[in-house]
Amino acid sequence: MKIQFPDTTSLTSMQGIELKQGALTKEGPVLFPQYPWEGIHAYLYGSVLERNGQLHMWYQSYLDGDDFFVNYARSRDGKKWEKPLINKWRVDERRFYPTIESEKERETKAIAFRNGSPGYWKTNIVSTYHIPSVIYDPEDSKRPYKLFGFTNEGYRVAFSKDGIHFKEYEGNPVLPLMRFPNPKTKKNWVSDVSPVFKDDLKKKFIAFAKTYVIDEEGRTRRSVGYSESDDFIRWSPPETIWTPSAADDRLAVARGFKWADFYGLCGFNYGAGYLGLLWLFYMDYEFAKGTHEGKMEVFLATSPDGKQWSRFSDEPLIPLSESGWDSGMITTANLPLFRKEGIDLYYGGSNFSHGVGNAQLLFDEQSHRFSVGLATLRKDGFVYAAGAKGTMTTKPLTCLKGTLRINADATGGRVRINLCKGGQPVESFRMEGIDSSDHLLRTGVRGEVTLKISVEGAKLYSLEVC
């Protein structure tokens, strides 16, 4: 049994303990636009998976004019990424090189990507979905890679044996286009964001499809919807499960904006519950024709059941930089990457705001970029328990192997553990003056035990009874 915060369902009491958000380290960009079909955009929306000792990334690129591409990259170390030109794709060279007047210049630039067939290039494009999620499902040996994303027809799915050559489901769209009209503004808003994951607790695929509500002021508010599927093909009608609150708006106002929406939620299993990466959209104003101007950063969200959500903190998990490559918007991969040494969060970062690209705010092709960065946390590092002299007591836990595994930073304090049987202490341990994510303690005690844990000036991330 593993105690993994913020979940406290395995505890009967907790005194003098505060649950705090873990600190992460950002670096980047580790992947950036460089090919004609990427324009100034190479970013997550998308997915990062680890398979057979290699990392695989499916990221989004975009060309002004509503051309969206899902692109594939791979890496051994997670920092140096290769974009293999493995798929031929029909392209319009004038579309990719709009500023070149000379046919000869265009031919010279395009020749490196020619596939040998007229009208085709060698690319790393694998699909034309928008905001894609790629799921690896080992239970489906014939088509383990499952792709879910948005098109103008609604949400569609595709399947692949290798994660590169995808075949679309013949019954697409699996969720028809969802429109949300606002009678006051005379605008129709469309659900186009839906991160997906495979829920190991419910044994279902879950899609957090964007929905909209109209608030008391007549504003259309982006919200989080929920849809589920047993087979990735038949999806339940999305229901709205989380809408922005006055507390979310206050965060936007504190940052100099007017209000906040939920642009997207990437939920995933964590311990006995769920965590989520909430893309909080701070908005300044709405264009008369078009979307909203504002910025976006990522907050940690928690849920006991995958439907009832709340923000964990008023501080962002992945904050915008004051200036530089990720100072405008931040979005994330649909799932964190849980590795042996820690947690990797790949994210998209831009140096321009959300409204850029509308007629009123044009892209600066020379300076604007949307790239991919890397944020890292220690193992089990999303949330930790801290206290000057805090204590907690567990429910009865089963100890089969006589091992306790502790993830804690006790360099400036200590963690004490008393093992009890039948309400009586039988053995005591102490971790002090060290920082370890895998500190092992051996005990001769077996069977049902209760732990009484004290945290004194330390950070306890997780504790496992084996």
Image (cartoon, rainbow, N blue to C red):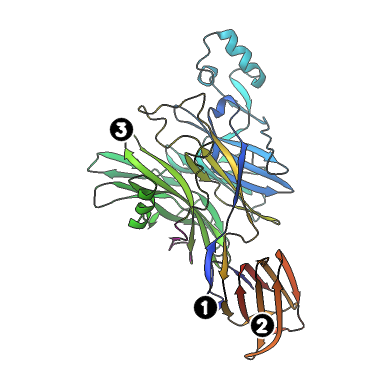
Predominant secondary structure, magenta span: loop
The local crowd at label 2, few if under 14, some if 14 to 19, many if 20 or more residues have their Cα within 10 Å, is: some
Query: Does 85 sit left or right of 275 as displayed?
Result: right
Residue in the picture at 67% in, 31% down = 86
Dot 2 or dot 3, earlier in sequence? 3
Task: Please name whichever residue, 434 or 43, is drawn nearer the observer in this view of the structure.
Answer: 434
Q: Which residues are magenta?
A: 305-314
* Label disc, if present, on residue 418 of the rendered structure: 2
Quick check: can you spot residue 101?
yes
Q: CA distance from mark 2 to mark 1?
A: 16 Å
Q: Position of residue 350 (x, y in %)?
A: 51, 37
Q: Position of residue 171 (x, y in %)?
A: 48, 44
Quarter holding the N terminus?
bottom right
Quick check: can you spot residue 466?
no
Considering only vertical position in the picture, is 62 above or below 449? Answer: above
In magenta segment, residue 306: yes
The local crowd at label 3, few if under 14, some if 14 to 19, many if 20 or more residues have their Cα within 10 Å, is: few
Identify the residue under disc 3.
289
Q: Amino acid at mark 3?
A: Lys
In magenta segment, residue 52: no
Q: Amino acid at mark 1?
A: Gln
* Label disc, if present, on residue 15 of the rendered structure: 1
Q: Position of residue 243 (x, y in %)?
A: 36, 55
Residue in the picture at 35% in, 53% down = 250
Q: CA distance from mark 2 to mark 3?
A: 64 Å
Q: Residue furthest front?
A: 412
Task: Please name whichever residue, 461 or 446, is drawn nearer the observer in this view of the structure.
Answer: 461
Dot 3 or dot 1, earlier in sequence? 1
